[in-house]
Amino acid sequence: MIERQVSPEPGAFEQMASLTLDTALFRSEFHLCDRVSEYLADIVAQSHEDPARYANFSSQLINEMIEFSFRSAVPTGQIDFRLLKNEERVRVSIEFAPVSDHQPDWLANDTSAIANGHPAVGDLWGLADAIRVNLHTEEHKENHVTLMADFALLEAVR
Amino acid sequence: MSPSSPSFAVEFDEINQEIVLRGTMRVRSPEEMTDATDLIRRSFGHGGHLVYVNIKRLTHLNMTAFRCIADVLTEACLADPQRRIVIVASSVIAWSAPLFETLASAQPNLSVEIYDSAFYPGQTFVEDESFIPILRTQTKMTWRHEREILPRHGMKEGMAIADICCGIGDFATLIKRQFNPTRLIALDHSKKSLEYARRVAAEFGLNSIEYTYGDASQMLLADNQFDFVTCRHSLQIFDRPDILLRELYRICKPGGRVYITNEKNSHCLGEPHSESIRWTYDEVAKLFSHFDMDVEMGPKSRRLLTDAGFDTIKVESFMVTNLDGDPRDFADVIEAWENVYAGQMAVRRGDSPDFIRRFRQGFKDHVLAALHPKGYAGWPIWAASGRKPF
Ligand SMILES: C[S@@+](CC[C@H](N)C(=O)[O-])C[C@H]1O[C@@H](n2cnc3c(N)ncnc32)[C@H](O)[C@@H]1O
């Protein structure tokens, strides 16, 4: 199981790339989830020994995070996709405003959410656990939340 | 970039009791999975006590789709506790076994196996380390010809190039030096060969070649990426070259070209002792065909490329001979063939010692022809390419 640690202080990460979309536009086209995840996963994997394979690996979770925000975001305002890195990790972060009834389950961060009527939450955490990627969330002012996943910067997948 | 159009397929192979899932399953709602799950459910209805679920070529899967599959699998496990369900995953796709393991931990009659062999019938011979010296010397010999042939098929400087089934990567390093591509990716399914390739590239300071572990019949590379895609001496070892060609076509840019080389082993020749040599190479072709490989494929290149949808097809053949450079190189290749073909493959087929002795003699005569001051030894190869239409 993955330790759901408090995220390291953000200062340790530097920004690599970012993409901001109008949430209404993003939510109008499901296929964008796949497009954006493949795009981000390619960058996440770029310094790996086998980029094609690590991109496939990381896109599995990134896509789930993006689909999750696709389903949970209020259809107004903006959604921010960011890639950050430090010496060891590449962090994928997605910041958006969720519809309010989704929020409590997220912060519970666990697969018991399936039982609470939000299978998507359970699936997201379940996938991260299964493939051993550290996933965590942060709450912000004005109801915004950030979903974050930390991928290895260098080492190859087993 | 999207790796492929979001499409997937589910099939049931009754003979092997195998449900095959492949492609990209990223569905918006469970309803899009209904046909697939119905087929899986029906297959279990027809299946026996042991059913395989092959996910080796399922490259992308979202959790909406996974949940649907998980539900039918769980249902099938509960419906018949005597039935064993084995999920067969590939190590190329690093997330798939761990994800499906989560189901196995809940259902005692379901298990996950990582299965990287049997991609094609002759795999055990070709991925064997003893093949490395063959490949290295072969490429050294063919390169003398191919460095001139490739530009005729459209290869030039500054292209994005993929070498699929790259083996030990020596062709990729030669391409890198000669044609200085903007991007060069080399894919193979042999970890040993890739390790070797990476080591050699590092020694030569060629750090921009992207070596990737993958399955050529379902690559993790995006559509329409490369100006030039090469696949040398490899279509002939697959029992389904059409599947491979479809993938080469997919990753090639419209207007780009796919270049393939293949042999016609029964046309290997030599003097003196031409009869013994001819007999042996006729037998080589039969031996490969026993293992579902077609080393007579060279002259079929035009048809294969046409059927795969390419246009402006070019085909040429060339003969590697003992007169190209050092004849000892050619003799080394022939000796390596003898070791693998007579020493391993014929033995595996169960051939008699008499047959193997005669079979080996042809190779020895070919070596003699190669090294003989008045001899001649040849190995014919077909190089062909086609353009992916706009
Ligand atoms: C006869 S060798 C040719 C290697 C190289 N192109 C050359 O000419 O030296 C065939 C190669 O295909 C690779 N191969 C076989 N099946 C494969 C698959 N499903 N995906 C990727 N590579 C595969 C083998 O590992 C082997 O390196």
Image (cartoon, grey):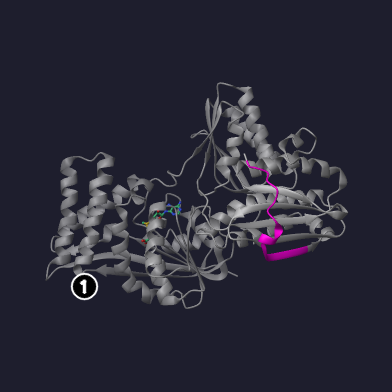
Viewer-proximal residue, B155 or B268?
Answer: B155
Q: Residue tagged by mark 1?
A: B323
* Residue A7 located within the stretch drawn in magenta: yes
Q: Nearer the viewer, residue B205 or B97?
A: B205
Residue B228 as seen in the image, left or right of residue B272: right
Identify residue type, mark 1.
Leu
Q: Which residues are magenta?
A: A2-20
Whether residue B186 can be seen here:
yes
Q: Quadrant holding ligand 1?
A: bottom left
Chain identity of mark 1? B
Write down the quadrant of residue B330 in the picture. Answer: bottom left
> Which residue occupies 74% across, 56% down?
A94
**Residue at coordinates 15% horizontally, 42% vertically from top-left?**
B354
Residue B358: % across, % down: 16, 48
In the image, is residue B280 part of the stretch drawn in magenta? no
Q: Is residue B73 above or below residue B125?
A: above
Question: Which x, y percent locates residue B217?
Answer: 50, 52
Residue A77's spot in the image, x, y percent?
A: 86, 60
Seen in the picture, residue A45 relative to B348 is either above or below; the reply is below
Ligand 1 within 8 Å of the CB at mark 1? no
Q: Is residue B68 left or right of residue B319?
A: right
The residue under the point 33% across, 49% down is B128
Residue B292 in sight:
no
